Structure formats: C-alpha cells, structure tokens
Amino acid sequence: MKYVALSEIGNVRTNNEDYYLIFKSNNDNFSIFLVADGMGGHNAGEVASSLACKYVLEYLLINLKRFNEIAKEVIKEAYSYANQKITELQVENPLWFGMGTTLAGVFLLKGKVIISNVGDSRVYLINAEKIMQITEDHSLVYEMYKDGKITKEEIYTHPQKNIITRAIGVDKEIEIDIYELTQEELGERWCILLCTDGLTNMVPESYIKEVFVKSTFEKVGEVLINKALENGGVDNITVLYFTA
C-alpha cells in the first residue's frame, strides 16, 4: 500500500484547523484513514478535529473484535463516541463552546472498503476511467443542489457554501453516512482521496482527475495544494490519498 498525506494552512487563515490520521495494524489486517475540518474560536477547531480522529481510533481499537465482525455498526458507534466526548468537553471548558468538526473516514478491512462521513469533507474514488465523489456533503448548498435549485458548479461560489448541516460535537445525536465499495466498483488503477473543502472549493474535480493521471503518485498532493493556493487558498487544505 502507498499513501500520501499533506496539510497546508493556506493563504488567509492564521492556524490550521484541519487534521488527518493514518493507522495501519501491525499485521496489516486493517487500515484507517481519517480527515477532519474543525470549527470554533479560541483554537477550538483544532481541538475538535484532532480529538474526533483520536476518539474514533480509540473506540475502534477498544472494540477491535466487534470491529472485525460488524465493521459498519462499530464505525457508527465510534463516530457517536467521538461526538459525545467532544460535546462533553464543551461543557467542561467554556472556551471550547461551539466547536465542532467534519469527519470523513475510509476503513480497509478484510478486503472491504468502508467509507464514513459527517460534514462536507469528501471522499473520492479515482480510477482509470473517472473521478467519483463517494460521500455526500452535509451542507446547505449540497441540499440545494440535490433539490435542483443550483448546479454542482454553483456549490463552490454560493455565498452560503460554508454552512454545514451535520458536524461532530454540535448535537447530542449524530447521523453518520456509511458506504461500501466493491472490488468491481474500485476499478483498475484505483486511488482513494480524502480531502477538506479547502481543496474542493478551490480546485475543480476535472483538474483533480487530470493531476492523478499525469503526475507521479508522490507528487499529486503537492500539485493539488499548490493549485488551491494559486486559486486563493482561503481555507486550510488537506489531502490524503492511497492505493493498494
């Protein structure tokens, strides 16, 4: 397995509220890839994004036997656990009140590719034929797009593009989207990309696909981040991609 992860503060922000986590088991039985985009004042966004990733990993490792048996259910439980812990932290520390985070994850387990998502950080499948967004954004503009009120291109320029409808740490209960990709769906020469909206708001999907086709695997992340910076870089930018 090959993977690359990069995170950049951007041209405007004074701190990086994005976070990523990669975990591979010693026996290569499973791998975990997480990307989070935090929000909240007083550095609370940084706290939320990093803790969400760490709490999910913590829960999965504590419940490893069940994770191996009923992965999707345990992943949902892990997200709920992270949500509960971050909600409780806001009560204990008023400076962190109002913090929250997106959380996109990919879990490789026994030949399965399981994907989870809360918020508007994305997971893409890129192969020899296409680039395909696997996750659905939990955002106001994505709902407008699904309702046919705006085009997909208008998502990226709409004045309300930053309003998300789901996040870890905001409500007591959290709804998690879970997907699974088959080997047939992965296709030939596949790669999976997790990224925050600091990339997708700045760089079109067509360009992302082009970079994966034309650049070396190791250089893809650098090229994408440089393009996001060139196009404005108004947010933190995180890319994590891997292939078998």
Image (spheres, grey):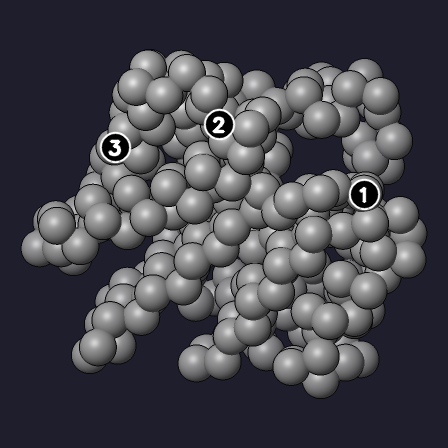
Mark earlier in primary sequence (1, 2): 1
Q: Position of residue 163 (x, y in %)?
A: 67, 21
Rendered residue at 12%/48% (across/down): 63
Indicate whether 175 appears above or below 35.
above
Q: Position of residue 101 (x, y in %)?
A: 50, 33
Question: Observer-nearest residue: 3 or 98?
Answer: 98
Name which residue type carries label 3: Tyr
Number of other residues with Cα within 10 Å of mark 3, as a class: few under 14, some 14 to 19, many 20 or more: some
Name which residue type carries label 1: Val
Mark earlier in primary sequence (2, 3): 3
Give left or right: position of 74 versus 107: left
Give left or right: position of 36 versus 76: right
Mark earlier in primary sequence (1, 3): 1
- Which residue is identified by label 1? 12
Which corner quadrant holds the N terminus?
bottom left
Query: Looking at the image, can residue 146 be seen?
Result: no
- Which residue is identified by label 3? 81
Indicate whether 52 appears above or below 119.
below
Residue contact at pointers 1 and 2, CB within 8 angstroms: no
Give left or right: position of 146 versus 57: right
